[in-house]
């Protein structure tokens, strides 16, 4: 067989040649903007010419600080196809973390959405590798800014040629993109994606048993393009010619619901909090979501009650998936096997609430403290290890933290899981969130899931609190649905749990709060909850 490097260039080329009429829809500053993949391709070429003009060299890191919009999508292909590395910056990082990741990656240019300029102005004196800032807005005129060496995106593009000869001599292992995980302790950790990794991951995303993403789909990535490449969806959509719907700056739940209805979205992807919000809105408004074939839900555990409510009330299924920044990210997808279909409804919901089966292309094992593989009995817990062509091999310029996380050629995920007889992986906890009571583990995710099946509960997070005798005990933080606020007591929740979980799992306390704090990527922020409810403050 011929030697053929797996490069993003050929993915971009396919969109241009085969799907020039297909649309990209982008919610931008003045409303809904639409253009075709033919227009897209020409602007990507212009952008590559701009990179050249700005003096970007092969391998240089070019950063984006942007929402999910069409200009960000242009960077997604222009930068890697040019031979540089797109570093997507998480716009919700604290400013000292932003300084850290920009300096650590040694970004040479930052492309920034107009409304995010203040984030850079605040840190401009501390980022020392950046030679140019490029402001992305609808206007060619630059807004007032204290940033130096600043250019207008639209002005630069207008002045550049609309064809570009993308290099075909790149090594498929050369870096194409990178992003940092929001490590809960210490500085963020950099993960580099190669052309080959992104290519093979995109192919996997298209497999029927993964997300089955195809040309026919109309895809709304709610998950930010700075969070593990919006789960790889933009790369796959361009390659397959799927219509993309990009929700732009600060989309609220109404904006998302309207986009789904108006654009007839077939696949939407986001974290559970988003779908909890959409469900609440649907209960008020009764949106017509009949176009949707799946709401992909990942990043945190999709509660069983949410999966059930989407089937029964929304009329479109939740498809539960698991991944992490280090895994590009898709690694597990939960879909019952064909011969399981006539099992009782409740059992099928339990299966779909698990994180699922390993996707084709990866390998996994689950090991205990001694490095022995655990039995696939749905009971024994161990750490999930992964390897494969789109699993990172190290943290960028960080040998110390890479060593334990990538020992023996496997990524050690820090997720503590069980595997059942059918091979479905169920995450009990992230290692740091586990509750160890009297030497036994309590799964906070299982407890949360069960609490969230209470009809009055909107969200629930369970954390460990120190205990004199048992070392740790569970504390449940519960947000009630609007109409139930003030009407449900601590004992009601405990009573509800009694026949559903082991007695020693029952939370010592249930506290009702208005909102569960979220991390920069929309997950329950258990670290903040632990600080809030540290011993003695209850
Ligand atoms: P961050 O570390 O900032 O949360 P990542 O997206 O890389 O960013 O986090 C990956 C982690 O998120 C996984 O290791 C796992 O703990 C959790 N996770 C991802 N998907 C799921 C899921 N479907 N169910 C439970 N946990 C999940």
Image: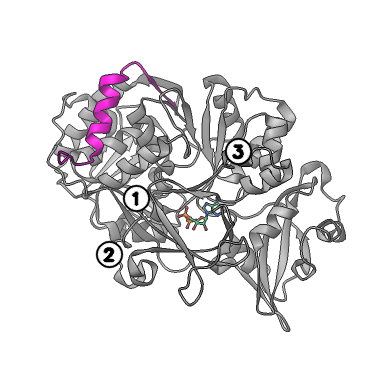
Total marks drawn? 3
On whether ligand 1 comes within 8 Å of the CB at mark 1, the answer is: no
User: Mark 1 or 3 closer to N-term?
Assistant: 3
Residue under the point 72% across and 83% down = 468
Residue under the point 47% across and 29% down = 219
Question: Residue 210's x, y, as percent?
Answer: 47, 40
User: Mark 2 or 1 closer to N-term?
Assistant: 1
Q: Is residue 86 visible?
A: no
Q: Which element type, helix, strand or loop, lies under badge 1?
A: loop
Q: Which element type, helix, strand or loop, lies under badge 3?
A: strand
2 vs 3, front mark: 3
Q: Is residue 114 left or right of residue 260?
A: left
Of all residues, the one furthest to the bottom in this rendering is 469
Q: Which residues are magenta?
A: 1-27
User: Mark 2 or 3 closer to N-term?
Assistant: 3
User: How far apart are the two marked residues, 1 and 3, measured between alpha carbons?
Assistant: 25 Å
Question: Residue 257's x, y, as percent?
Answer: 60, 29
Q: Quadrant of residue 199?
A: top left
Judging depth in this view, the residue of 262 and 357 nearest the camera is 357
Residue designated by label 3: 318
Judging depth in this view, the residue of 100 and 123 nearest the camera is 100
Residue designated by label 2: 397
On whether ligand 1 comes within 8 Å of the CB at mark 3, the answer is: no
Q: Which element type, helix, strand or loop, lies under badge 2?
A: loop
Judging depth in this view, the residue of 187 and 168 nearest the camera is 168
For residue 390, the mark is 1
Q: Are marks 2 and 1 in contact (CB under 8 Å)?
A: no
Question: Residue 290's x, y, as percent?
Answer: 62, 22
Q: Quadrant of residue 8?
A: top left
């Amino acid at each position: 067989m011929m030697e053929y490097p797996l490069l993003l260039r050929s993915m971009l080329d396919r969109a241009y040649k085969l799907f020039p009429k297909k649309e990209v829809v982008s919610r931008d500053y003045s409303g809904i903007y639409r253009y075709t993949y033919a227009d897209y391709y020409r602007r990507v070429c212009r952008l590559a010419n701009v990179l050249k003009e700005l003096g970007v060299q092969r391998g240089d890191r070019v950063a984006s600080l942007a929402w999910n919009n069409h200009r960000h999508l242009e960077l997604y292909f222009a930068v890697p196809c040019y031979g540089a590395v797109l570093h997507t910056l998480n716009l919700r990082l604290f400013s000292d973390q932003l300084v850290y990741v920009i300096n650590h990656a040694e970004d040479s240019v930052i492309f920034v959405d107009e409304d995010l300029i203040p984030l850079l102005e605040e840190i401009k004196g501390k980022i020392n590798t950046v030679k140019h800032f490029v402001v992305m807005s609808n206007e060619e005129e630059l807004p007032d800014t204290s940033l130096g060496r600043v250019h207008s995106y639209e002005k630069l593009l207008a002045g550049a040629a609309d064809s570009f000869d993308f290099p075909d001599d790149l090594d498929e292992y050369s870096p194409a993109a990178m992003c940092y995980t929001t490590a809960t302790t210490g500085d963020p950790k950099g993960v580099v994606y190669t052309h080959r990794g992104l290519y093979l991951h995109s192919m996997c995303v298209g497999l029927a048993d993964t997300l089955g993403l195809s040309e026919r789909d109309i895809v709304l990535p709610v998950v930010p393009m700075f969070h593990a490449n919006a789960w790889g969806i933009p790369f796959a959509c361009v390659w397959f010619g799927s219509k993309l719907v990009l929700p732009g700056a600060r989309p609220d739940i109404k904006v998302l619901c309207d986009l789904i209805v108006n654009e007839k979205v077939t696949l939407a992807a986001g974290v559970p909090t988003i779908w909890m919000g959409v469900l609440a809105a649907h209960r008020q408004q009764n949106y017509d979501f009949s176009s949707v074939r799946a709401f992909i839900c990942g990043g945190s555990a999709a509660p069983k009650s949410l999966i059930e409510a989407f089937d029964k009330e929304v009329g479109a299924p939740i498809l539960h998936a698991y991944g992490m920044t280090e895994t590009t990210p898709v690694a597990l997808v939960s879909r019952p096997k064909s011969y399981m279909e006539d099992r009782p409804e409740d059992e099928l919901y339990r299966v779909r609430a698990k994180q699922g089966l390993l996707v084709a292309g990866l390998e996994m094992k689950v090991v205990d403290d001694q490095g022995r593989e655990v039995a696939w009995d749905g009971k024994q817990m161990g750490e999930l290890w992964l390897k494969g062509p789109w699993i990172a091999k190290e943290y960028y310029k960080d040998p110390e933290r890479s060593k334990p996380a990538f020992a023996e050629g496997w990524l050690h995920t820090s997720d503590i899981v069980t595997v059942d007889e059918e091979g479905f992986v169920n995450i009990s906890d992230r290692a740091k969130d586990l509750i160890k009571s009297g030497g036994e583990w309590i799964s906070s995710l299982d407890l949360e899931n069960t609490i969230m099946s209470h009809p009055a509960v909107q969200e629930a997070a369970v954390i460990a609190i120190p205990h004199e005798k048992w070392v740790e005990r569970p504390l449940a933080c519960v947000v009630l649905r609007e109409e139930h606020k003030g009407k449900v007591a601590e004992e009601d929740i405990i009573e509800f749990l009694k026949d559903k979980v082991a007695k020693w799992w029952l939370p010592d306390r249930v506290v009702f709060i208005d909102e569960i704090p979220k991390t920069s990527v929309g997950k329950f922020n258990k670290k903040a909850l632990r600080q809030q409810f540290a011993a003695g403050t209850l």
